[in-house]
Amino acid sequence: LAVRGVDGARAPRRAIAIGAKSFTEQYVLAAVLAQWIERETGRPTRAVESLGSTVAFDALRDDAIDVYVDYSGTIWATVFHEPGLPSDRGDVLAQVRVRLAGDYGVRVAAALGFENTYAIAMREARARALGIETIGDFARHSPALAMAGDYEFFGREEWRALVARYDIRLRQRRAMDASLMVPALVQGEVDAISAYSTDGRIASLGLRVLRDEKGVIPPYDAIVLASARLAREEPAVLAALARLDGAIDAERMRRMNDAVEGEGRAPAEVAAELVAERLGGEAPDDAGRGRD
């Protein structure tokens, strides 16, 4: 039944609150969710942006926001506080689904189809010259190679696990600001860098991401999380979100990130192209509007 106020007029429908963490990929994905919900259900949305990982999940748990995109490995570490580095992608995702629903009433509405995880990247020409396609190949050449990582990377469990499983023995290890790593790689100051697998510069600069053939790096599947309130009160919105399952692969996410970071386009404009492709029609003329 329609909800009506005391004067009999139809009460305005609550805007669906969409959260986003404070980096480009999150802004793009939040815009995708907003436009998808609006087109599929006609419901208004509002953005709640620049959230930290813990703050974002707590806001969802407490029904302060309705939906946002997180990553399975992040939930595993920061919400479940599980030790170790699980590497089976399907098993982790299945456990995340069950435990979020059972412990918090939070639903995994969709797995978007890509991971954003740590990776090792090289210049394509350098990797090709050395015949390096995998981290195992990289390890065999590592005594002659220099690698840069951000200030946290070489102290993280992911790196320690890579060293142990692949026997990596670098000639030189350099910690630097993340913004300096790609220029250092492109200019040949280092042979490899730590990277995020959906970094837009991977596509724009033609970098090679080395395959982790032993599955050492934990899975970070991008997942759409819906609050208990949304799952309970908004079945049409939940059903619409489920149709985003598998909608974005890693290459498409890289291109969208690069469109924002490299080309200076608005996240909403980039998101509108994806939504138009999935649902048909053209991206609206006002898709590039700034966020509230």
Image: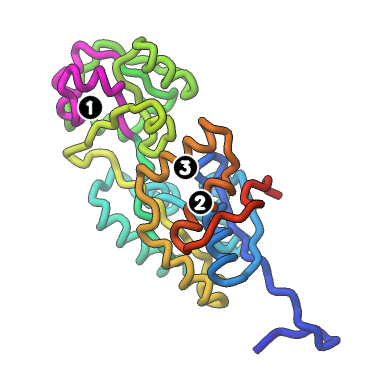
Q: Is residue 264 above or below residue 52?
A: above
- Which numbered mark, 3 or 1, is in the foreground of this view? 3
- Which numbered mark, 1 or 2, is in the foreground of this view? 2
List the residue tagged with mark 1: 163
List the residue tagged with mark 2: 273
Q: Where is residue 192 in the image (x, y as percent from the top left)?
A: 31, 20
Front residue (pair 34, 119): 34
Whether the residues at callouts 3 and 1 have beta carbons within 8 Å, the answer is: no
Q: Is residue 5 above or below residue 194?
A: below
Q: Which residue corresponds to the image point at 61% horizontal and 55% vertical from the top-left?
A: 284
Answer whether residue 288 is visible to the viewer in this image. Answer: yes
Q: Which residue corresponds to the image point at 25% horizontal and 33% vertical from the top-left?
A: 161
**Quarter of the image that includes the N terminus:** bottom right
The amino acid type found where label 1 is placed reads: Val
Spatial CA distance of label 1 from label 2 is 41 Å
Circle 2 residues within 10 Å: few <14, some 14–19, many ≥20:
some
| Residues drawn in magenta | 119-146
- Left or right: 122 with respect to 282? left
- Left or right: 202 with respect to 164? right
Q: Which one is earlier in the sequence, the residue at label 1 or at label 2? A: 1
Assign a secondary structure to mark 2: helix
Q: Position of residue 131 (x, y in %)?
A: 15, 22
Q: Which one is earlier in the sequence, the residue at label 3 or at label 2? A: 3
Assign a secondary structure to mark 3: helix
Spatial CA distance of label 3 from label 2 is 10 Å
Check if residue 126 falls in the magenta segment.
yes
